[in-house]
Every structure is written in C-alpha cells, then in structure tokens.
Image (tube, rainbow, N blue to C red):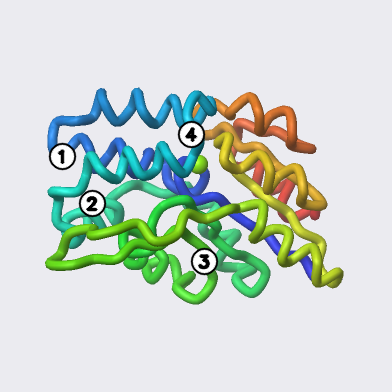
Amino acid sequence: MKKIYLFDLDSTITKGEILPTIAKKIGKEDEMKRLTEMCMTQDIPFDEGLKKRMGMLKDIPVSTIDETILDIPLNEKLVDFINKHKNECYIVSGSVDTFIKKLMKKMNMENNYFSSRATVKNDRIESIDFVIDKEEVAMDFINKKEYKVIAIGDGSNDAKMAKIADVGIAFGGVRKIAPSLLEAADYATYSEEELCELLEKM
Ligand SMILES: [Mg+2]
C-alpha cells in the first residue's frame, strides 16, 4: 500500500510559530500569542481564531509577511525526510496560501500542499475565502482505499486528522502538544530524530 504523509506546517516543520513571528514585527506579539494559545487549546474554534488572528495582520503588506515566513528556521531533518519522500508527502496547513506560497516553493512542495485560502488586493489580505478542514483532507486520501495515511502535527487543529489517519503522530519538538491531539494520536515524540526514525519505519 502506498504511504501518504500529511504534515502540519506551523511548529511541526517550522521551528517558530508563523503568526506570532509576524505579529512581533508590528509589536503585537503578546496579543497574538494569547490568541494563538486559545486556538491551540480550543478555547475558541480554529476558523474563528484564524480570522481574528489574520485581522490583526491586515495592515501588513503580504509581501512583507511571506518574506518574514521564509526567515523562520525549519526542522531540517524533517525537511530532508520530506524531500527524500516527496511523492508521498503533503503539507496540510491552516495558514493561508498567500502567506506560505514562497515557503512551499523553497521546500519544493508548491504542488504538494493544502491550506486555507485568501484573496489579496493591493498587497493586503482582502478576505479569507476558505479555512481548511484537515480531517477532510485526510478523509479524501483514506476514501481512495489505496493509501496508508500517516498524519503528523502539534496542535488541536491536527487532532481530527490524526485520529482519522491510519497512524497519527503528535510532535512536540517545537511547542507543547495540544491535549486533544495527544489523546487522538497513536504516537507522541518530542525529538525530531525520533520522529524521523518513526516516519521511516511506517
Ligand atoms: Mg502546528
């Protein structure tokens, strides 16, 4: 059976959190961190939280944002694994496409990602048109009945995807694993090396 790996991006592949990193640029880091924390622990639903957090960034040019995202360090061993198994790997990100397009290109994953989507006008986010449902992405692969689906993430918005996948892996190498994900996952690891070893064994 062909394997499909579905990777969360933020704090799974990136070593820093995307939206708080951008918020730092405009001195709204604390406010953003609080909001992000609430999203991760499910005090507010993910799509509502995403829209609120994006609202905080509405005055920053998208061209500044995607460059800032490019500068966030990555878990390089994980990126190596993804490059080595490119045909089996997809990034599944709650972030909007316009923010992460450049990073996906840099990772050679521009044709291998699913994300939320936004419309940009005059270099600013005009609207958020689609908020991704990661469970749905996993379900589409599972329904094809020809893949073993392995889902990897750190946040509460990864929990349903991890639960529905054949194998769900919680990775706490960057930040604390969300309790709901820890409960849904088959494996949990806090080390990037261990994660890569686990992925190779699937
Ligand atoms: Mg994440």
Q: Which tag, 3 or 4, sits closer to the chain's start?
A: 3
Question: What residue did someone put label 3 on?
Answer: 113
Indicate the position of residue 156 as horizontal and vertical percent values.
Answer: 58, 35
Indicate the position of residue 147 as horizontal and vertical percent values.
Answer: 81, 67
Q: Is residue 103 left or right of residue 145?
A: left
Q: Is residue 96 left or right of residue 25?
A: right
What amino acid is found at the position of numbered circle 4 in the picture?
A: Val
| Cα–Cα gap, marks 1 and 3 | 26 Å
What amino acid is found at the position of numbered circle 3 in the picture?
A: Tyr
Residue at x-position 39% and y-position 31% = 36
Indicate the position of residue 190 as horizontal and vertical percent values.
Answer: 61, 31
Where, by quadrant of the figure, is residue 22 drawn?
top left
Residue 103 visible to the viewer: no
Tag 2 and tag 1, C-beta contact below 8 Å = yes
| Cα–Cα gap, marks 2 and 3 | 19 Å
Q: Quadrant of the C terminus?
A: bottom right
Where, by quadrant of the figure, is residue 23 drawn?
top left
- Is 163 or 81 nearer to us in this picture? 163
Q: Which tag, 1 or 3, sits closer to the chain's start?
A: 1
Q: Is mark 4 within 8 Å of ligand 1?
A: yes
SS class, disc 2:
helix
Give the number of the disc on residue 68. Answer: 2
Q: Which tag, 4 or 2, sits closer to the chain's start?
A: 2
| Cα–Cα gap, marks 4 and 1 | 21 Å
